[in-house]
Each structure stands twice: as C-alpha cells, then as structure tokens.
Image (cartoon, grey):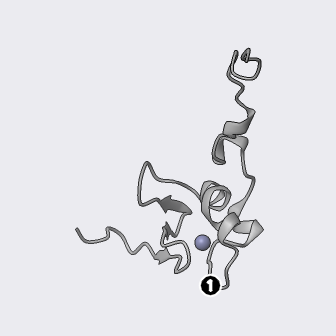
Amino acid sequence: MAQKNNQTLSTCPVCGVSITDDGKVNFTVGKPGTRAKLYARVCKFNQKPGCINQEPELIGDIAPADSFPQLKDISLPGIQDKPN
Ligand SMILES: [Zn+2]
C-alpha cells in the first residue's frame, strides 16, 4: 500500500521502529503508540548512536503506563512462606 499524504516516515535504524511525522510510532507488534512509549520500552534500553528517538522535546512526558509493567512488584500470596 502506498503512503497516503506526503507524510514522512522515519525508521529508527537502532530500534527498527518507524515513526510518522506527527509522532505516531508503528511497533512491529501491537498497536501504534507514541514516541514516549517507544522510548520507555525500547530506546531507553538501546542508548546507541543512531537512535532517532533520544530527544526529550520530541519524546515528551512518559506516562507510567508507557513502560512495561514491573513484574517484580507483583507479590503472589502464599509463595514466600511455604512451610518446609
Ligand atoms: Zn530508537
């Protein structure tokens, strides 16, 4: 399918994710997200030269929901105090 309009699509060579002109990020899996989401999930960890999503002005505010859930914070009842 051809791109509609003349929207520029930039692909981050490091993360392999494409970002549209208006800041919509097309992830390889899942729904499109924002630059903040991309940063919180991918670019923050890559930190390599060439990543096009490292500019705070473009990334904006990162909401807690943009990051992956912290599994270690979920405590399962009954596992820690198992009798021997
Ligand atoms: Zn990147």
User: Which of these two is toward me, 55 or 5?
Assistant: 55
User: Which of these two is toward me, 43 or 11?
Assistant: 43
Q: How many marks?
A: 1
Q: Amino acid at mark 1?
A: Gly
Residue 48 appears at what percent x and percent y? Answer: 67, 80
State which quadrant residue 76 falls in.
top right
User: Which of these two is toward me, 64 or 9?
Assistant: 64
Relative to 73, is 64 above or below?
below
Q: Residue furthest left?
A: 1
Relative to 45, is 12 above or below?
below
Picture residue at 39% right of the left edge, 75% below the top: 6
Residue 58 appears at what percent x and percent y? Answer: 69, 67
Q: SS at mark 1? A: loop
Picture residue at 41% right of the left edge, 54% below the top: 29
User: Which of these two is toward me, 20 or 15?
Assistant: 15
Task: Answer few, some or many: residues within 10 Å of disc 1's Cα (few below 14, many 20 plus, some between 14 and 19).
Answer: few
| Rendered-image quarter of ligand 1 | bottom right
Residue 3 appears at what percent x and percent y? Answer: 31, 70
Residue 36 appears at what percent x and percent y? Answer: 66, 57
Instruction: Give the residue pinned by disc 1.
Output: 50
Q: Residue furthest bottom?
A: 49
Ligand 1 within 8 angstroms of badge 1 C-beta: no
Q: Taking 64 as reference, is 9 left or right?
A: left
State which quadrant residue 23 falls in.
bottom right
Q: Quadrant of the N terminus?
A: bottom left
Q: Residue furthest front?
A: 84
Picture residue at 73% right of the left edge, 18% below the top: 84
